[in-house]
Amino acid sequence: MDIVLIIPPFGNQDARKGFDMTRPIGIFCLASALNDAGHKVRIKDFEKDGEGIEHIELFLKRNRAPVYGVTATTATRFGAIEAARAIKRLYPDSKVIAGGPHFSTCAEDSLRTIPEIDIVVRGEGDYILVELLRVFESNVPFSEVAGISFRENSTILHNPDAPPITDLDALPVYQDFDYQEYRETLFVLEKKVPAISILTSRGCPYQCIFCSVNNSGYRFRSPEKVVDEIELWTGKFPFIKGINFFDLTFTANAQHAKNICNEIIERNLKIMWWAESRVNIDLELLKLMKRSGCVALSAGVESGSPRVLQRISKAITIPQVKEFTEKCKSVGIRPSLFFMVSFPDETKEDLRLTKNLINELLPHTKDITMSATSIYPGTRLEKIARENKILENTFSWSQPFHSDIAGELTAYPDIPVFIDKLTSKEIDDFLIEIRALRFKSKINSNPLYYLRRGAELLFETGNKGMRYKLKLMFAFLRIWPKR
């Protein structure tokens, strides 16, 4: 059976500029499973092609199929919805299956408000999608397919969840693409090192309230299969010098991380690599990671307030954060830290603690990112937001939404921001102050480069207007004389 898999346009092109291009591993996994089952798959990646919503119908007119699969993140949900509507306008009898990080977490809402979507796949779709096409071909009832939601006689039904895929080694690797389509570089580093992303695990064992993937059945591939894939890509694309391990948390299982590092060393692979990590890892693991080629690690810290860390179920401590940056620096790994502001019950005193921690960390790393806390479907934060009327009872993820406040505080005016005890002005002022502190630290480390970069950003067009840039510049000037 023919199927077209669609990655929708990124509606906010200014926000898209901040992303490093990576190939769509999730959709590629689906395509591999479908190809193995004998189906003919076409992938259309509107993000990669830089095409907008206005190009959807033109593409569909040239690519008719009995089944379309549409994926989306929350940031691309409106492009996906427009794709579903365009499909049904042109081909009413074609089936529209929605999935991916967004639709998986709000199946009921999506089916209730978007009649053009026939079925929502919840969770990992590799085998579910293959099973669905078997159902379409044989007229077997949908009730036999685990992990889907659908309508039957105007009633929305949710079949039991499909079990997580345990044998990740059995999943095929999709190779039918050209590297130039996704010219990826090693994350964090300014130097553009040609790289490619690899997944060594799925799921996450942690329970952060702002994430929809929390506590989702952590599973991992064997180190042999992981390093086999590294050799596959470096053989196919010899110019690749870096690997981005795209796991949610590469070090969630320390032994798994050690086994991969040892396998890389035993095969004498000369590569550089980056991964996302927890801060609570020991020095010996960091040394081994460095030996195997690790040059940079990113870690979510979120807050400098122990009270907030406990409130958001982060399961780390402030001493661990400090030790992580010091240990990374001692072994020659570049640490990059993520912070967020405006969590439930967060106060100005909590902000003071976060600012103090960032000031303490800046001598060890200039890579500190701060953002306002957005609300995403399927998270405990969404539930808290609804309970506290931060999201109204009538709020739907599928209905048009625009917030000037969200646009000011984040790159996503169409994704609501969690605003509780702090005002939007207090959040904005704090974000600007932290960015000014970070920029000051960077200038101290490399004056010519960052002064030039600052001048470029001042005149660069984007979603942040001149008013915001001037506020940031004045904040920087206020703190510059301070030592």
Image: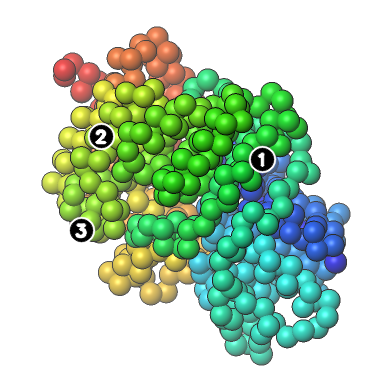
Disc 2 vs disc 3: Cβ atoms closer than 8 Å?
Answer: no
Q: Which residue is mark 2?
A: 323
Residue name at image x 24 percent, y 52 percent: 309
Instruction: Name which of mark 1 and mark 2 comes first in the sequence.
Output: 1
Crowd rating for badge 2 (residues with CA inside 10 Å; few <14, some 14–19, many 20+): some
Question: Would you place residue 113 above or below residue 324 in this image?
Answer: below
Name the element at disc 3. loop
Q: Is disc 2 placed on a helix, strand or loop?
A: helix
Residue at position x 57%, y 44% in the image: 223
Q: Residues within 10 Å of mark 3 (few under 14, many from 20)?
A: few
Give the image location of residue 228, x and y in percent. 66, 40
Q: Nearer the viewer, residue 61 or 385?
A: 385
Q: What numbered label is drawn on residue 345?
A: 3
Q: Are marks 1 and 3 in contact (CB under 8 Å)?
A: no
The residue singled out by tag 1 in the image is: 228
Between the residue at mark 2 and the residue at mark 3, the CA separation in whole angstroms equals 27 Å
